[in-house]
Structure formats: structure tokens, C-alpha cells
Image (cartoon, rainbow, N blue to C red):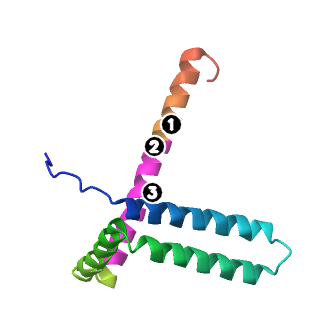
Amino acid sequence: MNTQAEAATSIGDVVKQVLAVVLVVAGVAAFYYFSEIQLLYRVLGLVVVVLASLGLVLTTDLGQSVWSFVLESKVEVRKVVWPTREETTRTTMLVFAMVFIVGLILWLLDMFLFWGVRLITGQGG
């Protein structure tokens, strides 16, 4: 059981997070409000607003912990031993074969059950 106490969030961090959400909502609203402006400019404006709000969130404790998690994840992905092309091909072919075999078994089971139900109910012969 994790008995670690949750750290208190400062008022400044909460204000920054709320401001970031308000910025994104305002950016999306502006994207649709200015529909007569060319799409490229509206998309670029929305990207700038989202990047600004991400930058604002990264200045909070939560943003810093998320960013450090992303960096640690990149390090862990580099440690993964990826399969060779031959191993991947062999595994893929095995999966295809097993799916085909299971599909065939289920089709035969369905066919025999349908035949048995028709025989029991007297609808076929």
C-alpha cells in the first residue's frame, strides 16, 4: 500500500492550470468564430495558443513531473530489445495461422450446432 502523502498544490499552480485551460477553450472558440479567415491562419493560431498553454502548464509542479516522466520514458524505450525482422515475420505468420485455425474450428462448430438444432426442431433433414 502506498502511504506517500500527496504534496500540496500551490495557488499559483492552480491558477496557471486554469488559465491554460481557458486559453485552449478561447483558442478553439476563436477558431470557429473567425470562420471567414483562411483555414491555414486559424490552424496556426490554434497551434500557437495550444503551445502557449502547454508552456504555461510546464511551469507548474505537475507539468514538471509530467515532463520528467516523458524524459524517463524515452530512456526506457531505448533499453527495449526489439525483435529482428525474421522474428517479427515468423510471429506474424504464426498469428495468422492460429486465427485461421480457430476460425475454421468455430465455423465447423457453428455448422454442426446449427445442423443439430435444425434436426431437433424438425426444420430440416
Q: Which amino acid, mark 1? A: Asp
Is label 1 in contact with label 3 (beta carbons under 8 Å)?
no
Crowding at dot 2, Cα within 10 Å, few <14 / some 14-19 / many 20+, comes out as few
Q: Splitting the image into 4 quarters, where does residue 11 fall?
A: bottom left
Considering only vertical position in the picture, is 71 above or below 10?
below
SS category of the residue bearing label 1? helix
Q: Is residue 13 above or below residue 73?
A: above
Residue 29 x/y as whole percent: 71, 64
How far apart marks 2 and 1 lie (CA) works out to 6 Å
Residue 100 image label:
3
Q: Alpha-carbon neighbours of circle 1 within 10 Å: few (<14), some, or many (≥20)?
A: few
Q: Quadrant of the N terminus?
A: top left
Marks 2 and 3: in contact by CB < 8 Å? no
Residue position marked by numbered label 2 in the rendering: 106
Q: In the rendered structure, does residue 88 fall within the stretch colored magenta?
A: yes
- The range drawn in magenta is 87-107
- The mark nearer the N terminus, 1 or 3, is 3
Give the SS element for disc 3.
helix
Q: CA distance from mark 3 to mark 2?
A: 10 Å
Left or right for 38, reference 54: right
Q: Position of residue 73 (x, y in %)?
A: 28, 75
